[in-house]
Image (cartoon, rainbow, N blue to C red):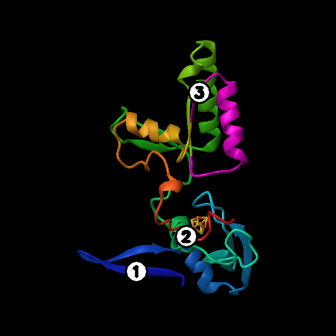
Amino acid sequence: MLGATGALAGGASRIWAIPDEWRQTLRSGPRLETWKMSTCGQCPAGCGIRVRLVDDIPVRILGNPIAPVNKGFTCPMGESGLELLYHPDRINQPMRRKGKKGENGWEPISWDVAMKEISRSLQDLRKGKQLGKLGFLMGDRNTLLTEFAGEVVSRMGSSHFFPWRSPAINELGFRQGTEDFPPLAFDLPKTDYLITFGANLLEE
Ligand code: SF4
């Protein structure tokens, strides 16, 4: 399936589609099929996936049968990963706040500019002995990168490291009065029913 449309209120609207320029490539190319093995990055389970490519363009995601975590299965979120990849609202480069905080104005900037700005801000904090103001929010990962980032933040003199789904980020959400954060803790011993998708948390 190279694209999909769906009928929404008010008429037919595109849900997701391979970008136009890539669709042109698919129409005119030799349609060579290849498969790449990879890891789903949409949650910390890290299921093994196979990605079908036509002329080097990803068109389908399936589970990898020899991956020890998921043995060929994926959850619906993993299998629909291309919707995330091709979603027109996907943020695929750094965004800098434009205007005042709370106005929700953002402008795209290059990675070079972003790295320079971050570096300058960190140096300013260090010079002003204000590294305690440094906060680091990390995405949905549970890897060595999480350990590494936490170590860097702590060695810089801040205790404000918030990896996603940690008690710390729940506390941050609580303090900021937002409601869209996950529960404060998972109490497995008192759980009657546990439903997981794509990975058996109790055996793997
Ligand atoms: S459980 Fe689903 S979202 Fe998580 S890594 Fe596996 S396929 Fe991806």
Left or right placement of residue 84 versus residue 156 in this view: left
Mark 2 → mark 3, Cα distance in angstroms: 33 Å
Identity of the residue drawn at 74% across and 81% down: 34
Q: Are the two marked residues, 1 and 2, in contact with CB atoms closer than 8 angstroms? A: no
Dot placed on the residue nearer the N-terminal end, 2 or 3: 3
* Position above or below: 74 against 46: below
Residue range highlighted in magenta: 139-161
Residue on which disc 2 sits? 197
Q: Is residue 79 above or below residue 32?
A: above
Residue type at tag 3: Ser
Mark 3, residue position: 159
**Residue reaching furthest top?**
128
Q: In this view, does 196 lie to the left or right of 203?
A: left
Between the residue at mark 1 and the residue at mark 2, the CA separation in whole angstroms equals: 26 Å
User: Which of disc 1 and disc 3 is earlier in sequence?
Assistant: 1
Q: Residue at x 70, y 87 (%)?
A: 30
Please state the quadrant of the image where ligand 1 appears.
bottom right
Position of 140 compared to 15: left or right?
Answer: right
